[in-house]
Image (cartoon, rainbow, N blue to C red):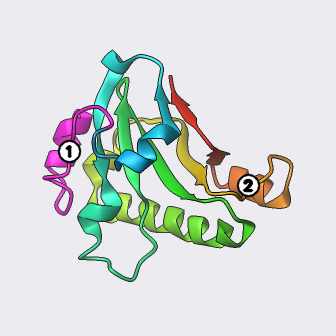
Amino acid sequence: MAKYSFQKAVEKTTGISSGYRPGVHALKKSDRSTIVVADTRLLDGSVDIDTAVQEKYPNENRWDYAIGYSGKVCYVEVHPAYTSEVSVVENKLKWLKTWLKEKAPLLDAIPKAIPAFVWAQTGKGAILPQSSQAKRLATLGIKVTRVHKLQ
């Protein structure tokens, strides 16, 4: 499979092809504060996966965003930080991985950032770093944070 840039991979993916935005402009304004960018010149763009595929998968737990940075991609879920929501975020990750494999192989072929999957916590709750929930999420490759720095 040919290697595509983040923008081309998004534009060639059915369902999200018109969702590419430069920088982090695909993120809802209320969600942009959850991402800090070390060097804006390295941003490859972003896509709001959740909004783009909502009509096709209305009853699924969909992942929010993909952000291209320095030739890699980071998947960000902006979600309330309550322990009762851990299983929801786990289901969102499962959906994302299946969707990438089956519907977005060009996007899936882009190297993943480290960490690749980020839960940007919102609200008054928090998943504490040493909690069993945080450890479970870490085994799935999900970083839990309030603000994620792309670097």
Magenta-colored stretch includes residue 134: no
As drawn, is 40 to the left or to the right of 61? Answer: left
Tag 1 secondary structure: loop
Residue to which mark 2 is pinned: 126
The x and y percentages for residue 64 are 41, 57
Asked if residue 68 is positioned above or below residue 142 in the image, the reply reads above
The label on residue 109 is none
Q: Which residues are magenta?
A: 1-24
The x and y percentages for residue 26 are 28, 45
As drawn, is 79 to the left or to the right of 100? Answer: right
Tag 2 secondary structure: loop
Task: Answer whether labels 1 and 2 touch (C-beta < 8 Å).
Answer: no
Query: Residue 122 or 19: which is nearer the viewer?
Result: 122
Query: Residue 7 or 30: which is nearer the viewer?
Result: 30
The x and y percentages for residue 127 are 75, 55
> CA gap, disc 1 to disc 2?
31 Å
The x and y percentages for residue 6 are 26, 36
Asked where in the image residue 84 lies, by quadrant, the reply is: bottom right
Q: Amino acid at mark 1?
A: Tyr
Main SS, magenta region, reads loop
Residue at x 32% of width, y 57% of height: 49
Q: Amino acid at mark 2?
A: Ala
As drawn, is 37 to the left or to the right of 17? Answer: right
Q: Earlier in the sequence, mark 1 or mark 2?
A: 1
As drawn, is 107 to the left or to the right of 31? Answer: left
Asked if residue 139 is positioned above or below residue 61 in the image, the reply reads above
Q: Residues within 10 Å of mark 2 (few under 14, many from 20)?
A: some
Asked if residue 80 is positioned above or below residue 60 in the image, the reply reads above
The label on residue 20 is 1
Residue at x 50% of width, y 66% of height: 92
Residue 151 visible? The answer is: yes
Q: Residues within 10 Å of mark 1 (few under 14, many from 20)?
A: many
